[in-house]
Amino acid sequence: GAGVSQSPSNKVTEKGKDVELRCDPISGHTALYWYRQSLGQGLEFLIYFQGNSAPDKSGLPSDRFSAERTGGSVSTLTIQRTQQEDSAVYLCASSFDGGRANEQFFGPGTRLTVL
Amino acid sequence: GESVGLHLPTLSVQEGDNSIINCAYSNSASDYFIWYKQESGKGPQFIIDIRSNMDKRQGQRVTVLLNKTVKHLSLQIAATQPGDSAVYFCAEKGGYNFNKFYFGSGTKLNVKP
């Protein structure tokens, strides 16, 4: 596709359940970022993938959060044992590489609601 | 830690007027800054960027000003249009971890017709 896509667009789950969020970056982009955006807030960095390097996981808020990127393309963000405070929009972005000055292209996000 | 903040959470302007959105950052080592526009239900969209070796950069109807002395960034939108209504974020990159962008909480711009 022409841009970053994310699925599902909306996810409603019950507290304690696991969820998987998917991101398809722009073809050829080697860098991929996950962010979390709570209502009325800015973007909170979660994790960063760059090529085959070890991901920067320093933004993951707890060990319930994990992410992987298979084949250097598609990424999945997994939240285990979801809590109500996990409710937010989860945004994925990709860029051509992760150097100092590269534009990030964002997907539309997945709105997660934990009941 | 690093922080990027915005002075005004909401800005209302009349169509045709110029808009100025401000942003303060705390890390003097940051060397790259971006302004993003986020419309309702969409992901942020790149507007304009500036490196720390510049004070000003102009795009189409937008200008970004960087004042490193006071760690302040501003976005100026000329002849604001209804389509400019959105939330605007500034983001900084650099410092001890150049992989990360740090985003402010955003300013909501309302353009009145």
Image (cartoon, coloured by chain):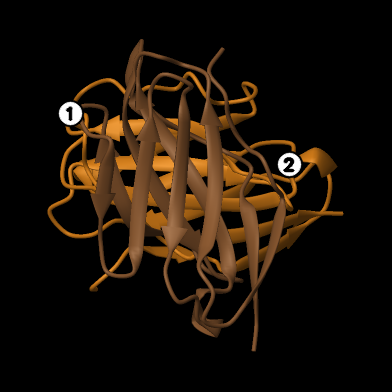
Chain colours: A orange, B brown
SS of the residue under disc 2: helix
N-terminal-most mark, 2 or 1? 1
> Subunit of mark 1?
A
Residue A11's disc is none
Disc 1 crowd, CA 10 A, few/some/many (<14, 14-19, 20+): few
Residue positioned 74% across, 52% down in the render: A39
Separation of disc 2 and disc 1 at Cα?
29 Å
> What is the quadrant of residue A111 in the picture?
bottom right
On screen, residue A108 above or below A42 = below
Q: Residue placed farthest to the left in the image?
A: A28
Q: Mark 2 points at which residue?
A: A86
On screen, residue B41 above or below B74 = below
Q: Is residue A44 visible?
A: no
Q: Residue placed farthest to the front in the image?
A: B17
Whole-percent x and y of residue A48? Answer: 36, 32
The quadrant the N terminus of chain B occupies is top right
Residue positioned 58% across, 68% down in the render: B86
> What is the quadrant of residue A9 in the picture?
bottom right
Residue positioned 54% across, 74% down in the render: B17
> Subunit of mark 2?
A
Amino acid type of the residue tagged 2 in the rendering: Asp
Disc 2 crowd, CA 10 A, few/some/many (<14, 14-19, 20+): some
Left or right: B92, with B40 as reference point: left
Amino acid type of the residue tagged 1 in the rendering: Asn
On screen, residue A84 above or below B38 = above
Residue positioned 74% across, 36% down in the render: A81
Q: Can residue A18 be seen in this view?
A: yes
The quadrant the C terminus of chain B occupies is bottom right
Whole-percent x and y of residue A82? Answer: 75, 40
